[in-house]
Amino acid sequence: MFDSLSTKLQNAFKNLRGMGKISEANVGDALREVRMALLEADVNFKVARDFIERVKSKSVGQEVVQSIQPGQQIVKIIHDELVELLGSANAGVQLSGNPSCLLMVGLHGSGKTTSSAKLGRLLLRQGRTPLLVAADVYRPAAMDQLEKLGQQAQLPVYLHRGETDVLKIAREALDFARANNRNTLIFDTAGRLQIDEPLVQELVRLRDLVKPQEILLVLDAATGQEAVNVATHFDQALSITGSVLTRLDGDARGGAALSMKAVTGKPIKFAGMGEKLEDFEAFHPERMATRILGMGDVVSLVERAAEAVDMDEALRLEEKMRKGQFTLDDFLDQLRQMKKLGPLESIISMLPGGAEVAKNTDLSKQEKEFRHMEAMICAMTRQERGNPHLLNAKRRQRIAKGSGVTVTALNTMLNKFAQMQQMMKKMGKFQKMMSRMGGGMLKR
């Protein structure tokens, strides 16, 4: 999403990093580029202006003048100010009472229903017992959509088809939650095509009835400057506690994310990074700032890996690798574990400098190759996976035909796998030799 902004900022930083001496004039030239990059990314012009003023006042101060690398110091100042602009730290949700209530509000099409299910799934994994409440009585498919998403997320959904009184649905949902020990209610409210005062007043009455701990404004990151106006109106009417930015995986310019906290004073609490239920995470300003500046986000990648990878299985595979017992079945498990981490582009962009690599590499071709590898291994019998030496010409023709690839592609994959096995055996022998040497030295 921030690709264009990230590229322009890194170009500006090339000039900044090369500065041996700092003056108000050359800092001004470099920051003019940064300001243009922010404005082109659809950042609110007042926010961009104030941001540049703060950076400039710090950049021409004593701290930078006396620095060994003044250009690098200015880049750090920009990073710190960007973190401050995005909200300093992850705010998280504040839940108290039994049951706790959350209102999901926003314009029509912003992703409220999907975000409600995603948030419910996240809270479920944190040990809470959420209940999704279908409080959108205007969009015909809203209840069906929430019910379907609830099934996918393994969450109960309270809905009352045919009922048009939102307050009655809310009362019934509260009674249902208390009777069924659900400690968190997530209300998926009706979307607005525009700021519709009667519907906003309905939200006010719903808020006064359920007294929610959190009122989260769901905003499409592609909304741009209009997102600031929408957020301001909802905040004035409802006193929102935070926002959820959706479609951060898209090609929007990202100005909404950078403007939201500065304009409303309310933190961004969550970010939707894709269509799947698991593509939802807590918003960490510092991590987002490092992504924007092209420094990657290794912490989020490690967290994603910890959630997706079975540690016992990983240790088992490591032991088999050391012993040189790695089979095609194990290789298939590894391919599937990697798929759980998400698209290759998403993984690589989280590494420092990865965004540039992803831009200049045909990752779709690599992903297609991984899918073909998985298909080829699945087309083999269990016996063939355990012992590839059984694969004569006839068997190879059958496997290639069954997986929709050529025999040449199959041979290439098997050769790569054989090379991998040989390398693992050598590593295992090397580790054994080192451990023996270490043991001998301890005895002395």
Image (cartoon, rainbow, N blue to C red):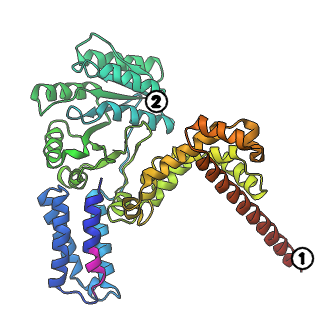
Q: Could you say whether the residue bearing mark 1 is in a helix, strand or loop?
A: helix
Q: Position of residue 316 (x, y in %)?
A: 72, 49
* 142 sits left or right of 384 in the view: left
Residue closer to the observer: 40 or 44: 40
Task: Find out whether residue 151 is within the magenta segment.
Answer: no
Quarter containing the C terminus: bottom right
Which of the numbered marks, if any, corresponds to residue 153? 2
Examine the image and state in which quarter residue 169 appears: top left
The residue located at (48%, 49%) in the rendering is 367
Examine the image and state in which quarter residue 200 appears: top left
* 344 sits left or right of 6 in the view: right
Q: Main secondary structure of the magenta part?
A: helix
The residue located at (11%, 25%) in the rendering is 198
Q: Position of residue 409 (x, y in %)?
A: 58, 49
The boundaries of the magenta stretch are 13-19
Above/below status of 421 relative to 69: above
For mark 1, does the 10 Å Cα neighbourhood hold few (<14), some (14 to 19), or many (20 or more) residues? few
Which of the numbered marks, if any, corresponds to residue 402? none
The residue located at (49%, 39%) in the rendering is 126
Above/below status of 148 relative to 35: above
Q: Position of residue 324 (x, y in %)?
A: 77, 56
Above/below status of 125 relative to 56: above
> Mark 1 highlights which residue?
443
**Cα gap from disc 1 to disc 2, whole angstroms:** 56 Å
The residue located at (35%, 16%) in the rendering is 159
Residue closer to the observer: 228 or 361: 361
- Residue 96 visible from this viewpoint: no
For mark 2, does the 10 Å Cα neighbourhood hold few (<14), some (14 to 19), or many (20 or more) residues? some
Q: Label 1 amino acid? A: Lys
Q: Earlier in the sequence, mark 1 or mark 2?
A: 2
Q: Could you say whether the residue bearing mark 2 is in a helix, strand or loop?
A: helix
Q: Label 2 amino acid? A: Ala
